[in-house]
Image (cartoon, grey):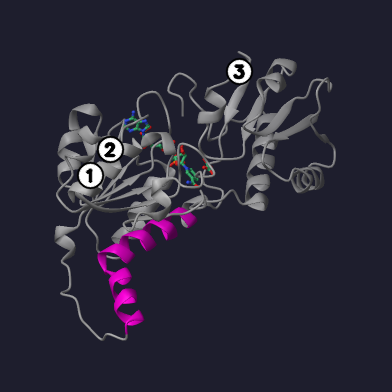
Amino acid sequence: MKITICCTDTNQQPWLAGLQAALPQAHVSIWSPSDPQADHAVVWAPPQQFLDEQPALKTLFNIGAGVDALMALRIPASTQVVRLDDAGMSVQMAEYVCHAVLRHFREFDGYAHDAAQGRWSYRKPRRKAQWPVGILGMGILGQRVARSLQAFDFKVQGWSRSAKDIPGVQTYTGAAQLADFLKTSKFLVCLLPLTPHTENILCQANLSQLPVGAYLINVARGAHLVEADLLALLDTGHLSGATLDVFRQEPLPEGHPFWAHPRITVTPHTSARTLRDESIAQIVSKIEALSQGHAIRGVVDLSRGY
Ligand code: NDP
Ligand code: OXD
């Protein structure tokens, strides 16, 4: 069995070593142009040339949950795309989102500001009933985030494409129920895949349906957000702030208005990192399952784009 690795912006040597150690019978190598045909590939944002030169790949294992970079490429018809499912990402995402929600809800920035001035001052406790959290995307990450927020007694509601029955979570489905979902989401967390249906979903028309003072957390993809619309809604006070982990252009360019905005927190696409050991273990167990003819989880439906 031949496995090739083609991961841009990634130190590929440890992936090679880890995969080779776990699959000693396989030939694992880092891809170079004109390499012989492989059976499986482990990829992150590969160039089109890679796919064009590997038309008989059985499986493309994406080392992330989001496959939007792959969806922009021509994928050989017989190749299945497999995303990471969780592999240690959901707990990181829950940590990140709970931190952002609690930081705003408990006004920790305000206390830090007061403390810096030597001021001992209390703020009136906020009531959770007035701060429901709406999660766009109730997949692997969205559901884990929902459970974690519930542990802090937040009221959680979720929006997805197909109907869901999740204990304690009010769920909304499809475009027809988006407005009802938005109007009661005081925090809005975006955990959608980037597809033609979800691109620009965080736009003026949708964000202005949130209650006045709502807070946005985008941890999915930068192209979900219309940046100028966010800035305008912060200016009018309709939104109280935003925590953004993902951007249309990454790294976020120097001088971008988000860097210095007093009500925007920027982090460098780090909310849920790919954990190499967990990811290798997941990929290896899927390769073994496939070689025994078993079905695996995480196969991407190319017609849906996620
Ligand atoms: P999943 O595929 O498990 O979940 C996606 C969810 O979005 C599902 O509930 C799906 O609905 C819903 N959805 C998709 N399209 C639509 C639509 N048109 N309308 C309504 N709902 C829709 O993905 P994950 O939870 O694993 O990951 C979500 C995204 O998070 C990734 O695609 C990636 O972009 C991002 N991500 C960001 C990271 C970071 O570090 N910032 C790290 C990892 C992921 P249904 O359940 O009905 O299919
Ligand atoms: C992912 C990511 O999609 O890291 O996994 O953004």
Instruction: Find out whether the residues at labels 3 and 1 contact each other: C-beta distance under 8 Å.
Output: no
Q: Residue at x 41, y 34 (%)?
A: 223
* Element carrying mark 1: helix
Residue bearing mark 3: 75
Q: Secondary structure at mark 3?
A: loop
Residue 112 figure quarter:
bottom left
Q: Position of residue 245 (x, y in %)?
A: 45, 49
Q: Horizontal and vertical percent for residue 179?
A: 17, 35
For label 2, the crowd category at 10 Å Cα-Cα, with few meaning under 14, some 14 to 19 and many 20 or more, is: some
Disc 3/disc 1 C-alpha distance (Å): 39 Å
Q: Residue at x 14, y 59 (%)?
A: 130
Hey, which residue is sitting farthest front in the picture? 255
Residue, disc 2:
229
The amino acid beneath tag 2 is: Asp
Query: Callout 3: few (<14), some (14-19), or many (20+) C-alpha neighbours within 10 Å?
Result: some
Relative vertical location of residue 67 with respect to residue 143 in this rendering, above or below: above
Q: Earlier in the sequence, mark 3 or mark 1?
A: 3
Left or right of 232? Residue 303 is: right
Tell me which amino acid carries mark 3. Ile
Q: Main secondary structure of the magenta part?
A: helix
Residue underneath mark 1: 233
**Between 200 and 178, the one nearer to me in the picture:** 200
Whether label 3 lies within 8 Å of ligand 1 gets the answer no
Q: Are marks 1 and 2 in contact (CB under 8 Å)?
A: yes
The residue at the point 18 percent across, 40 percent down is: 208
As drawn, 67 above or below 302 = below
Which region shows up in magenta? Answer: 92-117
Q: CA distance from mark 2 to mark 3?
A: 34 Å
